[in-house]
Amino acid sequence: MALNPIDEVHALQIQAGILGRKAGHSFEDRIAQKLNSLAYPRHLPAAEAGHVFTGNPAIILVDYIGKSYRKSVIKRVLAISTGALATSEEGLHWLNINGVTVKKCKSDLVITFEWDKGDATTVGVSTKQCNNKTPTNAQLYFTTAVGFSNLLIRNELPVSAAAITSLKQFCGDVGYRPMDDAESLHGRLSDPRRWFWEEINTAGRTEWENILSTRQDDVSRLLFQKAYLDDPFAPDFLLHKTKRSTGWNTTEVAVYGIDELLQLSSAYGGFSKKPYSVKKGSHKDPPGVQHDAPRFGIIQMQRAGQAQHPTQLQFNLEAVKCSPLPRQFFG
């Protein structure tokens, strides 16, 4: 029978039971467990410059957030892993945090900080992790051509029918592929299952490039924070495990406030197109054929192309030496 948390403390009790029965903890589950087991009150050490740290990810995160609010003492912390509750074997698909019912949440962790003077702050944290020796791109957002277009429209960023059509072409939606039209397919050397960025409807492509150039920060914020309609706990911070670690207390993580991350992403670069060729698979490009890969800031935009989700639209965080930003922006 499902266990429905009636309040935050009850949710923590359920979470503890779930994690205790799991053979292995996910990254965010373990962080929540560690945060709730730390000794409080916690006196924060002097602030360290930069965004990349090595150590216990839970301690790094709690200290970073505390110092970002210019606090010196944390009286108490309650951390909830939304994934641990929403996907538990007990069948729980919602939780209640601070009186708010949460069904879908972009934040992997929801953490309530009680400060030394009795005031409290609840924040959302998005977590990413890489377990390779060297950093790889991290998935930020996974949707469809229509889903992405509707995300912008719901947030007062107009998208025309021509732009939606062009994005369907880019993703290879049924009815919008070269293989759906004999004339388009004739003599085609590249993948017949989709149109590449430089091939899509010119008016639609021009509109998307204008949106991603002039509204880069707005679009980026939606991708980081607004995956779900009426999300009550959009992420305020990002915690990114950058690569494989030798142990929990020697883990390298990058931590950012979302606002600062958006500023750094914009400083890193505006909208651009990077040339590439398809070199693997059953539809390799012939020599000399290249395509445009759209990108803006640290965000890369591509057709997913997986067997189970071939027409999905995928946004990734670029990995350059250390995810999610190049070293020169770590400070």
Image: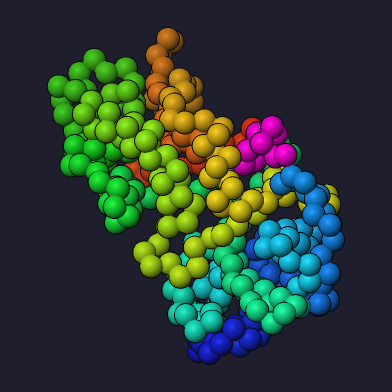
Q: Is residue 198 above or below residue 328?
A: above
Please provide percent x and percent y for residue 309: 39, 47
Can see residue 276?
A: yes
Residue 46 or residue 310, whichever sits in front: 46
Please provide percent x and percent y for residue 1: 50, 89
Determine which quarter of the picture holds residue 133: top right
Total marks shown come to 0
Who's the residue at 75% across and 78% down the image?
A: 116
* Residue extent of the magenta highlight: 322-331
| Prevailing SS of the magenta stretch | loop
Left or right of 164 in this view: 81: right
Q: Is residue 8 above or below residue 35?
A: below
Who's the residue at 61% across and 73% down the image?
A: 121
Q: Is residue 260 magenta?
A: no
Residue 258 or residue 165, whichever sits in front: 258
Who's the residue at 69% across and 77% down the image?
A: 114
Quarter of the image for the C terminus: give it.
top right
Please provide percent x and percent y for residue 222: 42, 52
Left or right of 268 in this view: 47: right
Residue 183 or residue 136, whichever sits in front: 136
Q: Is residue 291 above or below residue 228?
A: above
Determine which quarter of the picture holds residue 329: top right
